[in-house]
Image (cartoon, rainbow, N blue to C red):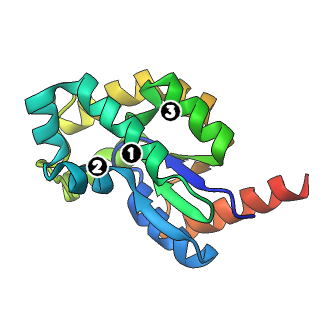
């Protein structure tokens, strides 16, 4: 299989960490759409949103997603990439989409441990655990609809990679 693998999920679910580990396991190339977008814009996500607004950021995100998609690539996406139906359709038709699902408590704990405020603008202005709960409640159905596979992302990166590899093997066998 050389199809791109798209990792989707809420902030803090481990898309970048798991993506890098999955890349090593598969011998693929790793790309983080937020990192590529920020490098190209020479600004953080927070700065782009502050200067241009969310809709402009989402347009940059779509262009970035489409420009980096290629065979044998693991692509970590931004948490809100599924808010655009164009992105959902693109990922589903151009590769395998994995939803890294984790409970709110795990997501909040990770975000509090590694806040990265400059890159992760608040979406609601509320405390992290409240924000994560609210945002996940709004987006979970979109993540599930977009994903080919839903994987429990609450374990270690190695455990999550094992689950992804098993899901991909089962899909290949059917």
The answer to whether the residues at label 3 and label 2 have Cβ atoms under 8 Å apart is no
Label 2 secondary element? helix
User: Which residue, given by chain and number where applicable, does mark 2 sit on?
Assistant: 37
Label 3 secondary element? helix
User: Which residue, given by chain and number where applicable, does mark 3 sit on?
Assistant: 87
The answer to whether the residues at label 2 and label 1 have Cβ atoms under 8 Å apart is yes
Pinpoint residue 85: horizontal percent, then vertical percent: 52, 23
Q: Nearer the viewer, residue 88 or 145?
A: 88
Of the residues under marks 2 and 1, which one precedes in the sequence?
2
The answer to whether the residues at label 3 and label 1 have Cβ atoms under 8 Å apart is no
Is residue 91 visible from the viewing direction of this image? yes
Q: Going 11% across and 49% down the picture, which residue do you hit?
A: 118
Q: CA distance from mark 2 to mark 1?
A: 6 Å
Q: CA distance from mark 3 to mark 1?
A: 11 Å
Q: CA distance from mark 3 to mark 2?
A: 15 Å
Q: Is residue 68 left or right of residue 60?
A: right
Q: Nearer the viewer, residue 63 or 93?
A: 63
Residue 51, quarter of picture: top left
Mark seen at residue 64: 1
Graded by Cα atoms within 10 Å as few (under 14), some (14 to 19) or many (20 or more), the crowding at tag 1 reads many
Q: Going 53% across and 52% down the picture, which residue do you hit?
A: 69
Is residue 125 visible from the viewing direction of this image? no
Pinpoint residue 1: horizontal percent, then vertical percent: 75, 64
Q: Nearer the viewer, residue 88 or 125?
A: 88
Q: Is residue 172 left or right of residue 7?
A: right
Of the residues under marks 3 and 2, which one precedes in the sequence?
2
Label 1 secondary element? helix
Pinpoint residue 92: horizontal percent, then vertical percent: 64, 38
Q: Going 43% across and 25% down the picture, which residue do you hit?
A: 83
């Amino acid at each position: 299989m050389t199809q791109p693998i798209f990792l989707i999920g809420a902030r803090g679910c481990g898309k970048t960490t798991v993506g890098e580990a999955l890349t090593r396991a598969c011998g693929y190339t790793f790309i983080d759409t937020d990192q590529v977008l920020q490098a190209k814009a020479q600004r953080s996500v927070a700065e782009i949103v502050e200067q241009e607004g969310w809709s402009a950021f989402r347009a940059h995100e779509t262009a970035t997603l489409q420009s980096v998609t290629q065979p044998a690539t693991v692509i970590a996406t931004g948490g809100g990439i599924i808010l655009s139906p164009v992105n959902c359709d693109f990922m589903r038709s151009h590769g395998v989409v994995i939803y890294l699902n984790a409970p709110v408590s795990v997501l909040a704990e990770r975000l509090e441990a590694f806040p990265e405020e400059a890159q992760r603008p608040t979406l609601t202005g509320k405390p992290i655990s409240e924000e994560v709960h609210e945002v996940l409640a709004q987006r979970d159905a979109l993540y599930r609809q977009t994903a080919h596979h839903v994987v429990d992302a609450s374990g270690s990166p190695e455990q999550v990679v094992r689950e992804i590899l098993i899901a991909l093997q089962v899909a290949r066998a059917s």
